[in-house]
Image (cartoon, rainbow, N blue to C red):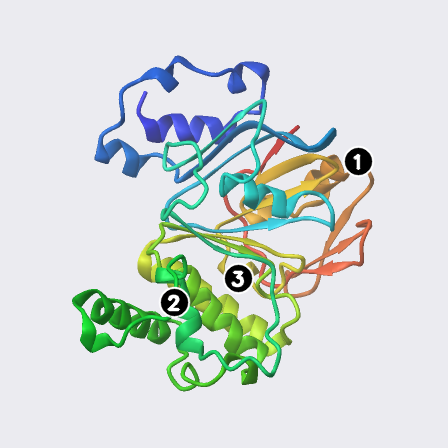
């Protein structure tokens, strides 16, 4: 069975103990470049995360393909950020297995770019936006970067920073002090910083939080363009799926220590969310087909332009 066929089989099967038993495949020689390109970029199998004695979530299984735009959803405190930290190699899953590009996650891997939950800059901060982006290249080095004319490496770094600033459409304000920029402008530069290592996987923890609706829409569109133009996998934790839903390939929905993964139109349904939450949830639809979710433990959520896709799969 090919890797691709096995990936599809895993997505259509309900989790069972046999699915998560460590396989002899862990002892196989390294896969070829072609095999690595065919397999999912992120593979999670029967994973359990614990912080101290507390189980955050358990028996979580899903795949994320290369170049997909995926949202991790769910109420506060269910472990959405913990899932990202597991992908970063900062939280160990046991039992179960989590792989990034076929390998266990490694802290500090250039394969993964990361934007943590939004941090604000005081208006008195005088560091320029371009310097914040540059920190993504050599922020682990002591001292300030040397002028570009003093070395080939510095000229290359300056060119990379310029290209990243252009990519996030921040050229007009990137040389201003970052403390004087708006929230949306700051977020663009922080995304550029996370892309500095040329990762194949970009993880963002609630990047739309505290932004106004216009900036939420603009940042969501920017992330989609980066995902599609660079073939980069983007996984975003979101409290409100509204701004990003038109761009999503799939969602991972966490609740009550379990997860359901699949296309948005198959996950956000009355039956699936009722099973996940263990309480009656009703998904209604407006006259134009947009769903309204009623009965969630949190406030009612509204999701426009919901599109169906492959069958969703409940795990746990």
Q: Classify 131 as above or below 303.
A: below
- What crowding class fits label 2: few (fewer than 14 Cα within 10 Å), some (14-19), or many (20 or more)? few
Q: CA distance from mark 2 to mark 1?
A: 54 Å
Question: What residue do we see at 37% from left, 71% from top?
Answer: 144
Give me the C-alpha separation between circle 3 and circle 1.
27 Å
* Mark 1 nearby-residue class (10 Å; few <14, some 14–19, many ≥20): few
Farthest front residue in view: 143
Q: Residue at x 57, y 39 (%)?
A: 261
The nearer-to-camera label among 2 and 1 is: 2
Residue at position x 45%, y 85% from top? 176
Instruction: Return the x and y of residue 180 as percentages of the image width and height.
Output: 55, 85
Location of mark 3 (residue): 246
Mark 2 or mark 3, whichever is nearer to me = 2
Crowd tier of the residue under label 3, counting other residues whose Cα lies within 10 Å: few below 14, some 14–19, many 20 or above: some
Q: Residue 142, how many percent across, how many down?
A: 39, 62
- Judged from this view, the residue extending furthest toward the left is 152
Q: Position of residue 286 (x, y in %)?
A: 70, 63
Q: The residue tagged with tag 3: helix, strand or loop? A: helix
Viewer-proximal residue among 300 and 209: 209
Choose the circle earlier in sequence order: 3 or 1. Answer: 3
Q: Are marks 2 and 1 in contact (CB under 8 Å)?
A: no
Residue 175, by quadrant, is bottom left
Callouts 3 and 1 close, C-beta under 8 Å: no
Q: Secondary structure at mark 1?
A: loop
Which quadrant would the C terminus be assigned to in this image?
top right
Disc 1: which residue: 278
Assign a secondary structure to mark 2. loop
User: Mark 2 to mark 3: distance in Å?
Assistant: 43 Å
**Can you identify the residue that label 2 sits on?**
143
In the rendered view, would you say 194 is above or below 145? above
Q: Quadrant of the N terminus?
A: top left
């Amino acid at each position: 069975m090919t890797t691709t066929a096995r990936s599809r089989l895993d997505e259509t099967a309900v989790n069972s103990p046999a699915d998560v038993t460590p396989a002899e495949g862990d002892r196989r020689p390294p896969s070829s470049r072609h095999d690595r390109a065919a397999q999912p970029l992120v593979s999670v199998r029967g994973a359990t995360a614990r912080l101290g004695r507390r189980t955050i979530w358990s028996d979580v299984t899903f795949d994320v393909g290369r170049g997909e735009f995926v949202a991790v959803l769910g109420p506060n405190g269910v472990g959405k950020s913990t899932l990202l930290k597991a992908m970063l190699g900062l939280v160990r899953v046991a039992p179960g297995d989590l792989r990034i590009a076929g390998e266990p996650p490694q802290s500090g891997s250039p394969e993964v770019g990361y934007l943590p939950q939004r941090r604000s800059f005081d208006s008195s901060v005088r560091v320029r936006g371009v310097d914040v982006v540059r920190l993504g290249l050599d922020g682990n080095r002591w001292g300030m970067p040397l002028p570009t004319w003093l070395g080939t490496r510095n000229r290359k770094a300056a060119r990379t920073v310029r290209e990243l600033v252009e990519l996030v459409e921040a050229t007009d304000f990137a040389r201003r002090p970052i403390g004087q920029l708006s929230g949306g402008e700051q977020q663009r530069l922080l995304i550029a910083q996370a892309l500095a290592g040329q990762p194949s996987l970009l993880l963002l923890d609630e990047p739309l939080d505290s932004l106004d609706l216009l900036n939420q829409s603009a940042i969501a569109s920017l992330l989609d363009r980066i995902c599609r133009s660079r073939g980069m996998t983007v996984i975003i934790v979101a409290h409100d799926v509204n701004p990003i839903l038109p761009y999503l390939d799939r969602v991972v929905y966490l609740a009550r220590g379990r997860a359901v993964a699949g296309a948005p139109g198959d996950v956000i349904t009355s039956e699936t969310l009722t099973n996940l939450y263990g309480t009656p949830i009703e998904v209604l639809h407006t006259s134009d087909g947009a769903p309204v979710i009623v009965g969630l433990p949190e406030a009612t959520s509204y999701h426009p332009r919901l599109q169906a896709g492959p069958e969703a799969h409940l795990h746990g």
